[in-house]
Image (cartoon, helix red, strand yellow):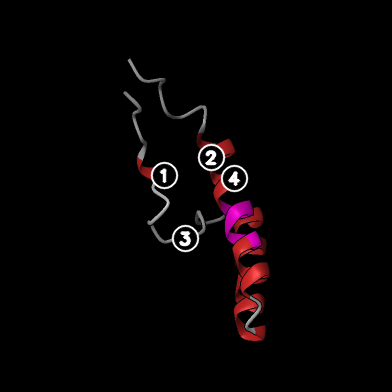
């Protein structure tokens, strides 16, 4: 059985972690892509943001039992 953690929910809106410069930069890239109506670049920014958040939080979540 696969256990999904809350931050792995693909349908959850991606929000930056307060005070995280990397999150802020990626959200800025995403917003710029939305302004340009560049769905590919927007998706890329979302993927990078999700990956960054997973890597940063990996040490905070205990492994499934």
Can residue 23 be seen here? The reply is yes
- Compare marks 4 and 1 and give the one earlier in the sequence: 1
Circles 2, 4 touching at the beta carbon (< 8 Å): yes
Closer to the camera: disc 3 or disc 4? Answer: 4
Residue 12 relative to residue 21: left or right: left
Magenta segment, prevailing SS (helix, strand or loop): helix
State whether residue 38 is above or below residue 10: below
User: Whole-Å distance between the Cαs marked 1 and 3?
Assistant: 10 Å
Q: Disc 4 to disc 1, how far (Cα)?
A: 10 Å
Q: CA distance from mark 3 to mark 4?
A: 13 Å
User: Helix or strand or loop: what does disc 2 sit on?
Assistant: helix
Q: What residue does disc 1 label? A: 7
Look at the picture and state if 46 lies above or below 28.
above
Which residue occupies 65% across, 56% down? 21
> Residue at label 3?
15
Q: Which residue lies at the image location 51% right of the left edge and 36% below the top edge?
A: 57
Q: Earlier in the sequence, mark 3 or mark 4?
A: 3
In this rendered view, identify the residue nearer to me: 28 or 3.
Answer: 3
The N terminus: image quadrant = top left
Give the mark nearer the N terminus: 1 vs 2.
Answer: 1
Tell me the number on the disc at residue 51.
Answer: 4
Magenta span of residues: 44-49
The residue tagged 2 is 54
Q: SS of the residue at dot 4?
A: helix
Side of 56 where 5 appears, left or right: left
Asked if marks 1 and 2 touch (Cβ < 8 Å), the reply is yes
């Amino acid at each position: 059985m696969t256990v999904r953690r809350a931050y792995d929910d693909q349908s959850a809106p991606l929000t930056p972690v307060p005070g995280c410069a990397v999150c802020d930069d990626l959200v800025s890239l995403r917003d710029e892509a939305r302004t340009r109506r560049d769905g590919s670049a927007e998706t890329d920014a979302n993927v990078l943001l999700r990956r960054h958040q997973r890597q940063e939080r990996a040490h905070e979540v205990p492994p499934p039992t």
